[in-house]
Image (cartoon, grey):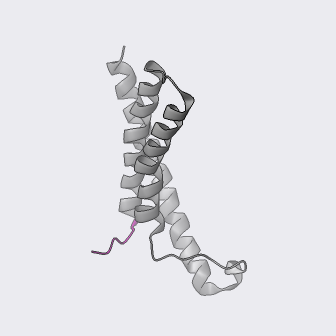
Amino acid sequence: MSIDPTKRSAALAGAWCTFGMVPFELWTDRHPFDSLLTKNAVTLIAFAAFLVIPVVFFVIGRIAGPFSRTWFLDPVEGAQVEIITRRMFCWFLGAAIFGSIWSLVLSCALR
């Protein structure tokens, strides 16, 4: 099964990022770790699950390879960069809109 990134999947990946990272930050603030190594390992796992993996699969895509240093001179690579940039913008908007609502809901629930 091939995963093709779209603007919708990018926006949902942004919402997924804030859906997981906002409660994770609240949880780590209320429950301090005994060691810094444990905190760093758990934070790395959370970043991978909620940020890195969704961005790679649902925003950038696995088909997009590395770009050359002169990508702006090549129309094909320039078009690919533009598509990825638009999906990144959709990811950011999805994270911002859902994150603002989710933060308000969680802050009211924890009072």
Image: magenta residue range: 1-6
Residue 57, image x, y percentages: 41, 64
Is residue 108 shown in magenta? no
Q: Which residue is at the front of the view, 65 or 109?
A: 65
Q: Quadrant of residue 3?
A: bottom left
What is the quadrant of residue 97 in the picture? Answer: top left
Q: Quadrant of the N terminus?
A: bottom left
Q: Is residue 68 left or right of residue 59?
A: right
Q: In this image, 105 relative to 56: left or right?
A: left
x, y percent for residue 47:
47, 46
Q: Position of residue 46 (x, y in %)?
A: 43, 42
Residue at the far left in the pictured view: 1
Residue at (62%, 77%) from the top-left corner?
67
For image coordinates 34% across by 27% down, the residue present is 105
As rendered, which of 82 and 18 lies closer to the eye? Answer: 18
Q: What residue is at 36 percent from the left and 53 percent from the top?
A: 12
The answer to whether residue 68 is above or below residue 44 is: below
Of residue 34 and residue 22, the one placed in the foreground of this image is: 34
Prevailing SS of the magenta stretch = loop
- Residue furthest toward the top? 111
Above or below, 63 against 86 in this view is: below
Q: Is 28 placed above or below 15 here?
A: above
**Of residues 77 and 65, which is closer to you in this image?**
65
